[in-house]
Amino acid sequence: MRRALLVMACLALIASACSSTSDGDPLIGIRASSDPAVGDDRLLFAVHEVDGTRRGTPDEVVTIVASPLDSPDVEFAAEATFTWIVPDAMGLYLVNVPFDRPGTWEIDFAISTGEPTDPFLVDIQEKPRSTAIGEVAPLVETPTIPGTPLEDLTTDHDPLTSMYEVSLDTALSNGRRTVVIFATPAFCTSAACGPMLEQTKTMAVRYPDVDFLHVEVYGGFNDPGFAPDPDHLVPAVIAFGLPSEPWVFVIDEHGIVTGRFDGVLGVGEVEALLDM
Amino acid sequence: MKRSVQTLVAVTVLAVGVAGCSGVPDTEDDVIGIVTEVTGDLTRIESFVVLDANGDSHKFAPAEGMTVMGAPPSHLRDHVVSGEPVRVVHHEGSNGELIANDVLHARD
């Protein structure tokens, strides 16, 4: 009888060990920003269940603690802001982290639901690859209308004409502020790309005293045999050192970069700079 | 008889050699999941990682000419942002590394 009970107990133990569901698995964080570097960095990250299901809503509050992997005693804690990419469907968390040294950092995060989480790692570069805040924006000539037909300047199906009237080098030296978005709507078919250009177009109407420009990532896209490959990257994309797209840069009246945003724009992020 | 065995061995060796040098992957497989990491930039993607529904991560190097739903490989970063799952059609390289031939929508 005792042996039978022992066997049953062992079986029960094995069964319970094998029956764990995804409910018990920790949530995982995935870095979504593409150019993290020393300084006040804008860290974008996604929260997923282990089966890939994207998580996150404004009600699921996420806090982070960032530490260099080799100096865990150094800690920076902050609450992340949730931003919808597709309203009520999918979004990301963003938080500004003052990374004070290059190397691998661990981002530990907690979610208000109380679910367990796994920390994730971020490699912080000494310097960003793309033009940094405080640097002079590269003066690059970009084609404009009417010299170039609008359909050869943008793959946006509903372009805002004013975003193609001024060359980037002119905009950066005319004493006005500039917002430039590098995006390629036709070659970015995921849900993440479209909203950034649409947000920028809305702002262009709201801020008539600011030059808003859209620069396509690839040139010659209407040419026969075109392929969106490195040979077709436009000079401005190369000059800004973009590692990815889409990107938005905010540049002051002196041509200095005051804001840089990749992947997604949080509510009011650009406006906060333009309203200063 | 001895001669026919020699011929058979020679043909077999040749056949194995031709198969080994053809450059055509023996078998293709696929992995469905979310893109969790992309290494590289707009000019060149060195590798990317896909997490499948079982929680297993798979690291891929892109094959020459690999596209992501017809877009350049750098488009993989957009899938990190959006979380939209992908299907990676791949084969195993000579050193056991996974080489991605094509990246499609997960539903394709």
Image (spheres, rainbow, N blue to C red):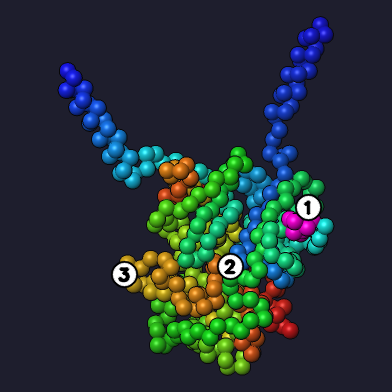
Q: CA distance from mark 2 to mark 3?
A: 29 Å
Image location (x, y in percent) of residue A138: 55, 83
- Residue to which mark 3 is pinned: A224
Q: At 45% from the left edge and 48% from the top edge, which residue is drawn?
A: B99
- Residues at marks 1 and 3 touching, judged by CB atoms closer than 8 Å: no
Corner quadrant of residue A59: bottom right
Which of the numbered marks, if any, corresponds to residue A110?
1
Q: Quadrant of the N terminus of chain A?
A: top right
Task: Specify the amino acid type for callout 2.
Answer: Pro
Q: Mark 2 or mark 1, which is nearer to you?
A: 1
Could you tell me if residue A64 is visible in this image?
no
- Residue to which mark 2 is pinned: A195
| Chain ID of residue with mark 3 | A
| Chain ID of residue with mark 1 | A
Crowd rating for badge 2 (residues with CA inside 10 Å; few <14, some 14–19, many 20+): some
Task: Specify the amino acid type for callout 3.
Answer: Pro
Q: At 64% from the left edge and 85% from the top edge, which residue is drawn?
A: A256
Task: Specify the amino acid type for callout 1.
Answer: Ala
The stretch of residues the image draws in magenta is A66-72
The local secondary structure at tag 3 comes to: loop
Which of the numbered marks, if any, corresponds to residue A27?
none
- Residues at marks 2 and 3 touching, judged by CB atoms closer than 8 Å: no
In the rendered view, tell whether residue A232 sits above or below residue A88.
below
Earlier-in-chain disc, 1 versus 3: 1
Image location (x, y in percent) of residue A9: 78, 18
Crowd rating for badge 3 (residues with CA inside 10 Å; few <14, some 14–19, many 20+): few
